[in-house]
Image (tube, rainbow, N blue to C red):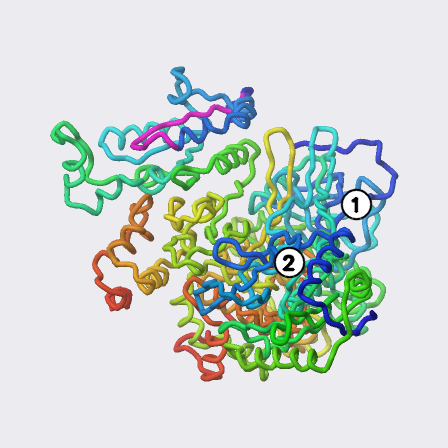
Amino acid sequence: MDVGDIAVLEREDLDMLIAALRSMGFRTIGPVVRDGAIVHGAVSGAHDLPAGWHDHQEPGCYRLEQDESPELFGWAVGPASWKSEFFAPEETVWRASITAQQVTLSEPDDAAGPVAIIGARPCEVSALAVLDRVLMGGAHPDDRYAARRDGAFVVAVECGAPASTCFCTSMGTGPSARGAFDLALTELVEGGHRFHVQVGSEAGAAVMARVPHRAITESDRSARQDVLEDAETRMGRSLDTADLPGLLARNLEHPRWEEVAKRCLSCGNCTLVCPTCFCSDVSDVSDVSGTVERQRRWASCFDLDHSYLHGGPVRLTTASRYRQWLTHKLSTWWDQFDESGCVGCGRCLTWCPVGIDLTEEAAAIRAADGAVATGERRAS
Amino acid sequence: MAMTATAEHAGRPAPQRGTLSPEPYRVTGRRLEGADVVTLALEPHHGRPPTFAHGQFNMLTAFGVGEIAISISSAPGAPGPIEHSVRDVGAVTHALCRTPIGATVGVRGPFGTHWDVDDIEEGADVVMVVGGIGLAPLRGALRDLVDRRRSGGGRVFVLAGMRSPDQILFAEDLEEWRRSGAHVAVTVDVGAPGWQGPVGVVTSLLPDTPFDPTHCAAFACGPEIMMRFAARALVDRGVDPRQIRVSLERNMQCGVGLCGHCQLGPLLVCRDGPVVPYGGVADRLFMERQR
Amino acid sequence: MTAGSRPTLAVWKFASCDGCQLSLLDCEDELLAVADAVRIVHFNEMSRAKADGPYDISLVEGSVTTAADAERIREVRRTSRRLITIGACATAGGIQALRNFAAEGEYLGAVYAHPEYVSTLRSSTPISAHVPVDLELQGCPIDRGQLLEVITAELTGRRPVLPVHTVCQQCKGRGTVCLLVAEGTPCLGPVTRAGCGALCPSTGRGCFGCFGPSEGAATGPLAERLLDDGMAPVDASRLFATFYAGNPTFGDQAVALSRSDSRADLAEQEEPT
């Protein structure tokens, strides 16, 4: 098979695909059920995948249930995003031993070998591309991220079961696969459990050369089309993206920011579940023996000290921090990286403890475009 | 913590390091500027320092304490070590200010946008409005501009606001630029016995400064509120907002656009700044609260 | 630091359970390294040896509940160059601050057979209510890693790395599935200061706030969410009124909940009049 080719993989041969990846030296990580959610874990065969599990998502609420269906990918997205595979939640970026005579610096090599991620949704494939541009696309790439990302293999799975919190169709990231995947599967259950397979790269073609597959038929094609069309109709939310960057840029003093701040916990969950949020803190720790480590960990723009400048934080209020987050995702990300920072995965709605809905907040601002809170506009 | 380098690596090329790993530099000189500012002269353990441009910054590490963004205060291409002027305001700057000659600090950079003084129209006046340590990133540019003035370039005006007469930073430089033909005016927040000069905010010096607003380039560097008022005052005098530049400051933890801390609206200040035009960029940002 | 010698460290106990002091003893291996760097001159849990002040670093555990202790803390402050309070009792009054919310003598009568022999102050107060404090280390008990970090930072002259963000961020970092969202389990993680490593949620239990409120904690919206999930106001009140009841952020929320019968009541109380 070549890049762009399409074939069909029978359900019973899915193990062969996973085995092929493992034999080629990839760690295979995919969706597994743990603690009442679909998260990422080691997958050694199809038996590890969440057969019959479905997620029910609402803002601030997530529940899993299992039925008799043989579906392995009958769910939308879980709390874990793939960024954690490449952008470590917490890591040591260098370690130095310091004596009176010298400073010896070393960078921990924590490479665990190339990873194959199985079951990345189209929105998540887009999210990785967004993160790649931020962390690898500039003049000073993040070498630690790049080391994990380079050579990673992406098995995307097109979305057949969007949640009520999903809005990838609005953001142009799904439910069909697009962008940088190696293989994209579509799970087809009606008329025989099988997968529609698109080859997205040379590496994908090399894997398929080791996996039994058959030619695609017209009924396979239309079965995939049905899955995707059905997914589009079940998309739970939408976001009007018409001039969205401009809308937010001209509404920085909108009363809605103060209103949402009354509900917002400023806890940072939205930023940590977001597959594109990339902020990190660095801090140096030392022990009494003279060893120094520079540590980096995920950070959130909802932390008060995130904007700390000598004299105090710049963004003191929850309103200013929520505004920073939302305008960055939907507006200034375009200025900085020429694309949207939001891919429409809906995680920030579901995993917000109080269920704040980004699509609702943006719509509220659009509904009263130009509104200015009393006394908000500072005399300049 | 006193640190010196081993001699064994001297002369070898610097090893390839990660984006977030500093290069070891040796402190080869230190000079006290006022009560709480120290200018450190730094030379790399290995090879030569990378080239830099006016207004850029380095990330300096005090090993065991932390890392912080500091503007380069020497001139590009000048012989000798590169200089950074550090004001003692927090744990890291405190440790840097206390670093003795011969000790090692970490350096990453140079990063950020710069001010291309070659872009200044021929013969145009240059007006620098600075507050305190805000003079540091412009020190190199001022040296070049004063030299240029000597060889027939435009006039140079330096308006500096300092805390008090005994806290005038870079006093020797100011005096040298004055001798070399620059118009130098210093005001202080709080006067002292014997101080003959003006007392008040730096913008109060502008009305008495005889520059040509229709043919001039300006730079403001200092606290954000000072830059805001200085830029507006310059515009009120008739200066084209696009000919005014400011140097922005935000929390920076990586210096290279990766950590997200320095966001200011559409800008990542470490990447898209610190030097930005006032007209069309900083003027809008200065309008909004808590950005 | 005391010239020419290792800095001295003293550990003081006020009204408390000794658990935070045990965190220091629990450091074992690391404690040996610290013991090389400091001279521990007063630490009742470790040794009967005592040395007179002044002390370079004093760690203070416990709250002030008696008139004698109110006097003693002034003496400790007077003889200490740096005074660091450790734990919920010392920083917020501890669980014994529950009596601040009850009628006088109510808890005393319930606990002691002969309350007439007990002489205490009306309320349990944090050390900072009596003397200036240089640093507060939160937790019930404190985290030993954080304690070592504080001591190391003191010795090396840097700022200790202590998070001010929420427990949620530690849950997300370690990949713990949110109990509140995925199971409806009451959890104070979104308003509680990180530092424990999100221990309870990782074992399936909701956070009960034993590191106190995070910076800018918004307890009101979280309380509403708990009531929306069907929690009785009295139970939600108790959730906020445990180890950090003496901290106004949690204590005031507990009081507001105890006065409300429903979510509507709570929202009404929060509206500014």
A251 with respect to B152 (left or right): left
First to last magenta residue range: C6-19
- Which chain is home to disc 2? A
Which of the two residues, C202 or B286, is positioned nearer the viewer here?
A: C202
Above or below: residue A260 compared with residue C192: below
Residue holding disc 2: A46
Count of all numbered marks drawn on residues in the image: 2
Q: Amino acid at mark 2?
A: Ala
Q: Amino acid at mark 1?
A: Pro
Labels 1 and 2 within one chain? no
Rendered residue at 41%/65% (across/down): A354
Image quarter of the N terminus of chain B: top right
Percent of width and height locating residue A125:
67, 67
Dot 2 alpha-carbon crowd within 10 angstroms: few under 14, some 14 to 19, many 20 or more: some
Rendered residue at 52%/56% (across/down): B189
Residue holding disc 1: B81
